[in-house]
Image (spheres, rainbow, N blue to C red):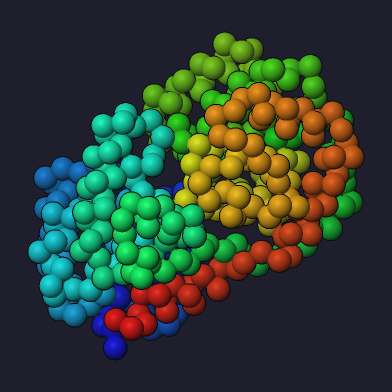
Amino acid sequence: MAGPVYFLVPGDPETPTGGFVYDRHVVDGLAEAGSLGGILRVDGPFPATDTDTLARAAAALAAVPDGAVLVVDGLAYGPLIEALRPHAGRLVLLALVHHPLGDETGLGNAERTRWLHDEVAALRHARRIVTTSRTTARRLAALGIDPALVRTVPPGVDDPLDLAFRAARSAGDRLRLLTVATLVPRKGQDLLVEALARLTDRAWTADLVGDARNPAFARRIREQIASRGLGNRITLHGAVPHAELDRFWRAADLFVLPSRHEGWGIAYLEAVRWGLPVVGTTAGAIPEAVPAVAGVLVAADDIDALTAALARLLDEPAAYRRLAAGAVQAAATLRRWPDTRREFNVAVTEGL
């Protein structure tokens, strides 16, 4: 019988990203099941770390009782392994891996190799690993992790919406595009701006919602929009609280996110939940997440293919309507968060 489950969160649990949304839901599920012993918040410069962060982690870990199960979000698991390793004998360590940190966009070859090596070495101290997609589970197997240690528990979405408003209105002459993603290179907003710069003779506007987590990349996007003369058509909204996102989902006609890698892609499914057709990429777990009837996926970093996909939906109303109808159809069949919460509780307690 597993002991109480503690969950280590790397920073503010209210951070508006898909990974933290997942964390909040599974923590709520542990609490509902009576399994949750507590939440450990460790602030730091993740996925990097420093001596102060390690010290804070060590102090938090010392308070966790012997025999407890400790789930550590993958953003912190590898970086905190020096603090976690001394407790591997008295605690049951579990790692929650959204995607390997070494697969983050923008790393040089040497840095990527080091990150992957260090993360795999750290994961060997985990009694069990939970991934958010089969794609990430296969990636870990390719990196040498024993598949028998891995459980996959995909994210879900909130309750179904009444999408009658989609059928009651048409997109009109101008498509309103929406991207919801943190401004970091991996999410590919630079690719979207470049593709849209080639389509200025079509009728569209675009709303880019997301925290400027990478200031240099955010500055690059702002400069790119200005240099392409798109300031009156592309709006950067910054981080938007979850409760205020509804108005963006409702007002949009098409969701576009040309991500270079995803361990799952919660925003894509949230778009489908709102009946929005999706233009994305085939990177990582995106094909696993996006229903085929609701999305058009192109190769990552292929601006020509992205431009062509957008042009077709802008130029051919019938093609847009078919994809939009597919999204509304798929919305009714999406996996829900209660399934994720229940399965996660089983994954971190059963057989330990």
Foreground pick, 199 / 260: 260
Q: Residue 324's x, y, as percent? A: 80, 48
Give me the residue at 14% from left, 61% from top: 85
Q: Residue 219's x, y, as percent? A: 45, 22
Give me the residue at 25% from left, 65% from top: 126
Numbered-mark total: 0
Q: Quarter of the image containing the C terminus?
A: bottom left
Q: Quadrant of residue 280?
A: top right
Q: Residue 310's x, y, as percent? A: 73, 31
Q: Is residue 62 left or right of residue 338?
A: left
**Would you place residue 48 above or below residue 196 in this image?**
below
Residue 101 visible at all: yes
Q: Residue 123's x, y, as percent? A: 26, 59
**Would you place residue 174 above or below residue 114 in this image?**
above
Foreground pick, 27 / 294: 294
Q: Quarter of the image containing the N terminus?
A: bottom left
Most extreme residue toward the bottom is 1
Give me the residue at 37% from left, 57% from top: 141
Residue 63 visible at all: no
**Would you place residue 83 above or below residue 94 in this image?**
above
Q: Quadrant of residue 159?
A: bottom right
Q: Is residue 24 left or right of residue 309?
A: left
Give me the residue at 60% from left, 21% from top: 194
Foreground pick, 263 / 268: 263
